[in-house]
């Protein structure tokens, strides 16, 4: 049996199989060659704060016989055995309950205004309302479709898709990480 409309193997990995064409069990998982937060189309700006994880000693370390004349010294001239061994990535939210509520209300108000204006423009230009579903902006495909809608309305140059995606990044991460 041969597949029809198979996506490229370089971008998608096939999962499952169909015993008969009507089964619809076979689906595809998108492959990304890098960490998801580094893919601009997916996450926008990386949302994480990064700290270097280090190992070793910066004060009081003795020079090693195996260093063969070269030694690591810190800015004060002390011998250092410190080396970076990884990265710690995190999200830190510090906010008061009142500010959180005010932010949510302001965000909802701006989104409502944007929905009203986009619908009005879409009705004038295309004769049908525009669907603005922020959950669909979580995927690259959803953002591409919305970006195309904005270009068809003649407002692609405003980068509304990017602004909405960046605004939703925190919400998306919370959904993915916290379930």
Image: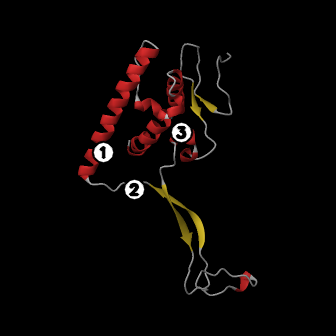
Q: Secondary structure at mark 1?
A: helix
User: At which x and y percent is residue 53?
Assistant: 53, 66
Q: Give the residue at mark 2.
A: 92
In the rendered structure, the answer to whether residue 89 lies left or right of residue 106 reads: right
Q: Residue at x 56, y 42 (%)?
A: 40
Q: Which mark is residue 164?
A: none
Colouring rule applied to residues: secondary structure
CA distance separating discs 1 and 2 = 17 Å
Establish if 60 lies above or below 50: below
Q: Nearer the viewer, mark 1 or mark 3?
A: 1
Q: Give the residue at mark 3.
A: 42
Q: Nearer the viewer, mark 1 or mark 2?
A: 1
In the rendered structure, the answer to whether residue 104 lies left or right of residue 139 reads: left
* 2 and 3 marks in contact (CB < 8 Å): no
CA distance separating discs 2 and 3 = 21 Å
Is residue 174 in view? yes
User: At which x and y percent is residue 99?
Assistant: 27, 50
């Amino acid at each position: 049996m041969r597949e029809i409309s198979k996506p490229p193997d370089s971008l998608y990995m096939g999962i499952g199989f169909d015993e008969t064409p009507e089964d619809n069990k076979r689906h595809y998982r998108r492959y990304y060659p890098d960490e998801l937060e580094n893919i601009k189309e997916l996450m926008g700006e990386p949302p994480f704060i990064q700290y270097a994880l280090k190992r070793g000693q910066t004060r009081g370390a003795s020079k090693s016989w195996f260093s063969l004349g070269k030694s690591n010294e810190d800015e004060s001239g002390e011998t250092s055995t410190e080396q970076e061994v990884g990265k710690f990535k995190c999200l830190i939210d510090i906010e008061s309950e009142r500010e959180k509520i005010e932010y949510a209300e302001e965000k909802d108000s701006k989104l409502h205004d944007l929905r009203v204006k986009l619908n009005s423009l879409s009705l004038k230009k295309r004769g049908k309302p525009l669907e603005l579903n922020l959950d669909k902006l979580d995927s690259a495909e959803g953002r591409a479709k919305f970006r195309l809608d904005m270009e068809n309305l003649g407002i692609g140059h405003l980068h509304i898709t990017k602004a909405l995606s960046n605004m939703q990044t925190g919400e998306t991460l919370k959904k993915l990480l916290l379930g």
